[in-house]
Image (tube, rainbow, N blue to C red):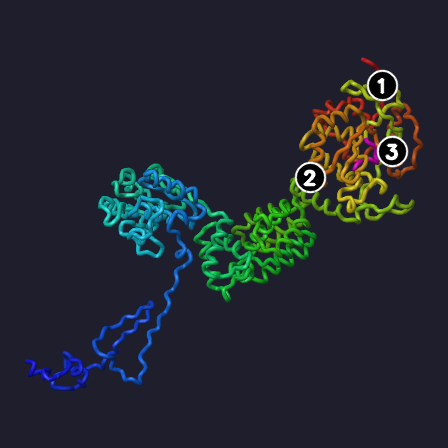
Amino acid sequence: MDEDLGLDDSPDLDDEVDGLQPGYGQEGPGLFDEPLPDPEPACDIKAANGEVDELASPTEPTAPEDQVAPVAVLRPATPLALYRRYRPDTFAEVIGQEHVTGPLGRAIINNKVHHAYLFSGPRGCGKTTSARILARCLNCVEGPTPTPCGVCDSCVGLATGGPGSIDVIEIDAASHGRVDDARELREGVYFAPVASRYKIYIIDEAHMVTKEGFNALLKVVEEPPEHVKFIFATTEPEKVIGTIKSRTHHYPFRLVPPRTLTGYLEKICAQEGVQVERGVLPLVVRAGAGSVRDSLSVLDQLLGAAAQGQVGYSSAAALLGYTPDSLLDEIVDAFAAGDGKGVFATIDKVIEVGQDPRRFGEDLLERMRDLVIVAQVPEAVESGLIDVAADQADRLRGQAAALGPGELTRAAEVIATGLTQMRGTTAPRLHLELICARVLLPVADQDGRGLHARLDRLERRLDMPSLVPTSGQPAPGTEPTGNTERPVRPVRQGDEQPTVERPTSSRPVPERPSQRPPAERPNQRPPAASRPTETAPAAQAAPMAAAGGPSTSDLRRLWPQVLDEVKSRKRFTHALLSQNAHIVEVRGKELLLGFTSQGTLERFRSGGSIDVLRDCLVVVVGADLQIQASVDGGPSQASRQPSQHPAQQPAPRPTRQPDAQSAEPAPPPDDEWAGDDDEVLDETGTDAAELLVSQLGAQIIDEQDA
């Protein structure tokens, strides 16, 4: 047969085959005598997926020597997403869930592993990852152990990027939650594992299982075979029926703290070799909302768009849709200056650049939150309470000082309430403008927040040198400029009586006025010049800019607010101060108070009222003053303001006749020194007759002993 084929003299079969030409002989090589195809190259190049398949050939390639052989081009495989590449393989690599990973590891060491677990928590916080790690720990050849070896078939299969394990079955309950799926699972439970110690079922999105499906699994979850473990993972544990939940060990996962997540992202950026500008990672953490997976997805997006291995703050803010800092600075500065035109111009810019009004409101609320913290903790940036760039930290301090803590808190509450109401609105721009209008007008708030905001503005204005008098009394016939205080109250006859210090008495209650001559009766009410509504002379007002604290006139102007704050804390102290004390002078950091009697002075010193008054001064005035108190019926005659009426010569108080009461001017209707009915006024040592004289302007005609 070899002779018929003519192959006996052929030195090489391959050479004869290579020499065949199409049409050679009567029969072609094909089945239907088709011509012989062209010779194929010795190497088949497949560029897909970066693979090259070479065909083994016993002979040299037949291509001519001058022809360049084809070159295999390898395309790099597409890298996995960051949240897949950096998925933890051990409990030690899981961040922010130490309250879960620690007990699970100790349960494995103590051989107290339960047959069913329920992992609950927000998305992207490590529930499914921890379930896979638990499966690695249980099926490791060296286990069960909390630290898998990482080299056995089970550990390699369940590692990041591994092919998986045939004995670890992951089920998505969102698409396999019907009763038929539960019955199929129940039937396969009783088969032994193929290559591992346990057969582990990881049921993700367990809250999507129907009630009938849970009922079908109830018996097998309650009493499974020894080789079966169940791990349920869900974001809504309340939807898991109680009969299933009661048969599991529940481990609640939580969101990762921002500081922990920021450090984790910094390590990933270092491993990826990308430089990230300061302030970018806080934006990523904020966008991820505490979810590790969401934060890694956002970071992966930024790293993919990095230019020359760097991610800038401006590009990151624009890509993520956050408001530029320049717009936030403009509107905050306009709030501090009360510039309504600037506020609404900034809102117009927000709309012009295509920014979402809701997102702008959220970013503005975040800025107010930072300012509130900076106002209370000036070193918040250095201590890590807020994470901003170094140049932005100085701007935040300046804005916090310009607004004040009270107005900042109120503005944050107004914006937060407005954002809640903005959801679902058909006119978000109008709603944003209304929110900003309410921030601009603290007087529109009838509650305490608006009052504190107005007090903050008043305190900031008191810091201006123009409000501090720099000269003596104005010349006669001229109206003082820069003084917006109310007119001087008409001086009563009783106020013109020279003050005589009341002798010290051992009795807790001062003796009645009838037991002393009229000339020895002290003034029962602080004179008009000592009230906070009066204008104190410049000789008694120390410049606040030089002393670093309020002047005498400033403190008298704010004294009603101080008394209101005292009354809200301790009514006994309010009764002492409002009826028996007045401001004598402010000397630098010391406040000198004058009391009408020694008894009220002792009660003020011994009842803890000094600390109450100091705290209230810090809240209202913003200054911590040392309190010095002494017996002083009122300031000297020279310290009083000149009355608008002709001055009367001081004379002993005559006995008032009934018809003489009409000649005395009535107090103005806004008299802030009118005392309220107080159930503890009797504790001050002031009797009823003294209250009538001091508060109602009555005159004692005659007294008779009972």
Q: Residue at x 68, y 57 (%)?
A: 341
Q: Which mark is residue 514?
A: 1
Q: Which residues are magenta?
A: 526-532
- Where the N terminus falls, by quadrant? bottom left
Amino acid type of the residue tagged 2 in the rendering = Val
Q: Which mark is residue 374?
A: none
Task: Classify mark 1: residues with Cα within 10 Å, few (<14), some (14-19) or many (20+).
Answer: some
**How far from the left and from the top, in percent, is residue 695?**
79, 28
Q: Is residue 508 visible?
A: yes
Q: Earlier in the sequence, mark 2 or mark 3?
A: 2
Answer whether residue 586 is magenta in the image: no
**How far from the left and from the top, in percent, is residue 255?**
46, 47
Amino acid type of the residue tagged 3 in the rendering = Ser
As measured in the structure, the alpha-carbon distance from the residue carrying label 2 to the one carrying label 3 is: 30 Å
Q: Which mark is residue 636?
A: 3
Q: Is residue 663 visible?
A: no
